[in-house]
Amino acid sequence: MTGMLYVIGLGPGDEGQVTPEAREAIAAASHFFGYKPYVARLDLRNDQIAVPSDNREELDRASAALTLAAEGKTVAVVSGGDPGIFAMASAVCEAIDEGPEAWKSVDLRVVPGITAMLALAAKIGAPLGGDFCTISLSDNLKPWETIEKRLRLAAEGEFAIAIYNPISKARPWQLGKAFNILREILPKEIPVIYGHSVGRENEKIDITTLGEAVAEDANMSTCLVVGSRFTRVIDRRDRPFLAYTLRHVREGQND
Amino acid sequence: MTGMLYVIGLGPGDEGQVTPEAREAIAAASHFFGYKPYVARLDLRNDQIAVPSDNREELDRASAALTLAAEGKTVAVVSGGDPGIFAMASAVCEAIDEGPEAWKSVDLRVVPGITAMLALAAKIGAPLGGDFCTISLSDNLKPWETIEKRLRLAAEGEFAIAIYNPISKARPWQLGKAFNILREILPKEIPVIYGHSVGRENEKIDITTLGEAVAEDANMSTCLVVGSRFTRVIDRRDRPFLAYTLRHVREGQND
């Protein structure tokens, strides 16, 4: 007997950004796996069981969820933001790929969510309004050389760059190094936007330039957008700054 | 007297993916601007006024909305997907930047939505599970040379690539050319995912390889994801194929 596995995106934190589809999936499931703070956001019924776990245990968590689902249960794995962006959906697929044949029969439903960069971009205007790259600075799962190469290529392509996992206690120097790499290629005037705890109570959005950007201003709850030569900042005086990336690219427009 | 301007993301089409925040904004506004098919998705009250317009009139539409908002009205501009991804938020910011001073006083609220690539990725697994680039193939607003350069750099960086606006009657050759450019750099085995009308009634997801991909299989309602060397496909036999991009990059793992 085969059950279901939902992999649900809860959005960045604002309950108004949790989709009805996600709410329905939460109502349907009996067991909930996920990183503690995400499971803590769920308002579960008495008959629903929370199985919170620590961060960086993605494959174990995915396997535990798939085991229960293969037994016929309706199981949920929850992620903040979107489960497909540096979150649980890839880990669940990897577990299915490498696990027992029975896991391939589980009815898998990934439920998308508002990912951090979209919530941050909306708060400040439209800094991802043109072509952009999305890069995680975590070198837990990939070599730093790969990250460095991708940052250089993204800058050479004049993409705006959304940065996830910029810094943590275990990874204190990566963001500073990333800024230095980008400064070698990009003009110092380019806007850099810090979104701290976007969609949560202590939300704070800061804007600076690549020349002035310092890693110490970011923390584990920060998502960043580094603009491009085509990103503009609007000083509205009686309202917060806006930042947006032009939809058009024309030669000479930035001289 | 200064009003409000909401720029609202309606998600790709599935009503279950419209956030409560978007519903609230729709309930609050009196006038609705947007490309016809998006405005048609709204279930407006008798006292709410729809102002649909053709595609490619973004700046005019933004200006008309800002004019009304500056007069004190509560106005909405609606986009499919997320308004910050190749949609109206950047056009509205550009209009504010270049328009009358009074437009800077309008209370602008961008409401994020599920953008097409997130909905598509969720349907097939997690092809955007690692670093990725998001590129519009429309050369209406930027030179084709810029797009070509960005495709090459994205391929060299082994990013997965989400492609928006792949093809239209006025732009028939760009996607085929893009596939050719990517084939010069990437292995032919790399998965290519076509999401047609994702989240809508006629939704269809196809998967092929870069070697076999043809532009004619895409249309104006298609969003694509070109995987990387780290994207895997799972044949589940009694269930649809899954595709996911590994969270980890290790040398030798793909040989």
Image: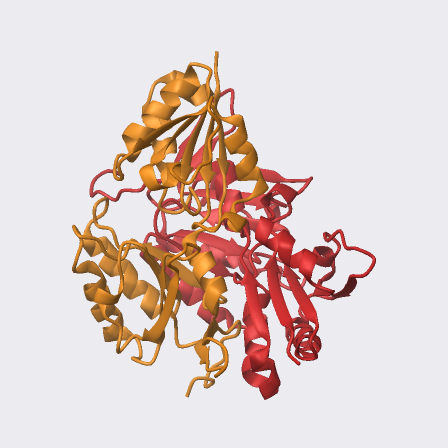
Chain colours: A orange, B red
Vertical side of A190 occupied by A103: above or below: above
Of residue A98 and residue A89, the one placed in the foreground of this image is: A89
Question: Among all residues in the image, which is located at the extreme top?
Answer: A1
| Nearer to the camera, B206 or A166 | A166
**Quarter in which the C terminus of chain A is drawn:** bottom left
- Side of B1 where B134 appears, left or right: left
- Estimate the x, y position of residue B229 in percent, counting from the top left: 33, 44
Q: Position of residue A140 (x, y in %)?
A: 21, 46
Q: Is residue A75 something that shows in the picture? A: yes
Q: Residue at x 18, y 53 (%)?
A: A171
What is the residue that sits farthest to the front in this orientation? A46
Residue B98 to residue B29: above or below: below
B141 or A23: nearer the viewer: A23
Residue lying at 35% horizontally and 77% vertically, measured from the top left = A190
- Left or right side of B73 for A17: left
What's the residue at 16%, 50% (across, down)?
A170
Q: Is residue A141 left or right of residue B112?
A: left
Quadrant housing residue A178: bottom left
Figure disc tally: 0
Q: Position of residue A22 (x, y in %)?
A: 53, 38
Q: Image quadrant of residue A153?
A: bottom left
Q: Residue B221, percent across and down?
A: 63, 51
Work out which residue is located at the far right of the displayed protein and give it: B46
Residue B80 visible at all:
no
Residue at 38%, 44% in the rendered image? B129
Position of A35 relative to B94 (above/below)? above
